[in-house]
Amino acid sequence: MAFLKNRVSVPLVGSVIVLGIIGLIGAFTSDPIGFLQSVAVFALVGLAIFFVFRLIVRANPQKKEQQRFIKAAKKSKKRLQSKTGELQTKSSSFGSLASLKKSKKIKKKSPVHLTVIDGKKGKKKNRASL
C-alpha cells in the first residue's frame, strides 16, 4: 500500500510545483511591481515571525540554565586537564614507568560526594508493642 501511495504522490506534488511556477511567471509578467511588492511583504512578515520566535526561544530559562551548565562543565574540564598536566610533568622526571603508574592511579580516583549516616542497626524492634 505504501508503494502505491508513493506513486500517486509524486505526480501530484510535481503538478502542484509546475502550476505554482506557471502562476509565479504569470503574476510577474502581468504586474512586475505588484509581484515584487508582495514578495517583499512576504519576506518582511517572515523575518518578523522569525525574530519573534527567536526571542521567545532565547528567553527560555531552561536554555539559560543549560548554557550555564555547559560553561561550568568546560571550566571544570580545563581545570582537571591543567591539574593532570602539572602532575604528569612533575612525575615524568622520575621515570616513564613510574609516571604511567601514577597517572593510572590518578585517573581511577574520583571525588566522593556521599557520606555515611549511622542508623539504628544495633537496636532490635520491640514487635510486641506494635
Image (cartoon, rainbow, N blue to C red):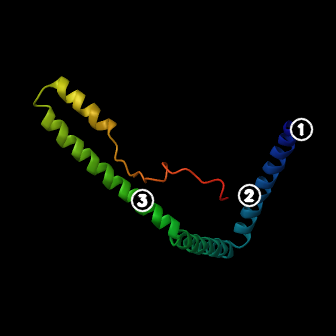
User: Residue at the spot x=77%, y=53% of the render?
Assistant: 18
Residue 88 position by quadrant: top left
- CA gap, disc 2 and disc 1: 31 Å
User: Residue at the spot x=81%, y=44% of the render?
Assistant: 10
Residue that carries the numbered disc 3 in the rendered image: 69
Q: Position of residue 2 (x, y in %)?
A: 85, 39
Q: Residue furthest top?
A: 97
Q: Of residues 101 and 65, which is closer to you in this image?
A: 101
Q: Is residue 54 above or below residue 6?
A: below
Q: Amino acid at mark 3?
A: Phe
Residue that carries the numbered disc 2 in the rendered image: 21
- Which element type, helix, strand or loop, lies under badge 1? loop
Q: Residue furthest left?
A: 93
User: Residue at the spot x=21%, y=41% of the render?
Assistant: 85
Left or right of 17 in this view: 99 = left
* Labels 3 and 1: the sequence-earlier one: 1
Q: Which mark is residue 74?
A: none
Q: Nearer the viewer, mark 3 or mark 1?
A: 3
10 Å crowding of disc 1: few (<14), some (14-19), many (20+):
few
Q: Amino acid at mark 1?
A: Met
Q: Quadrant of the C terminus?
A: bottom right
Q: Position of residue 83 (x, y in %)?
A: 22, 46
10 Å crowding of disc 2: few (<14), some (14-19), many (20+):
few
- CA gap, disc 3 and disc 1: 48 Å
- Which element type, helix, strand or loop, lies under badge 3? helix
Q: Position of residue 64 (x, y in %)?
A: 46, 67
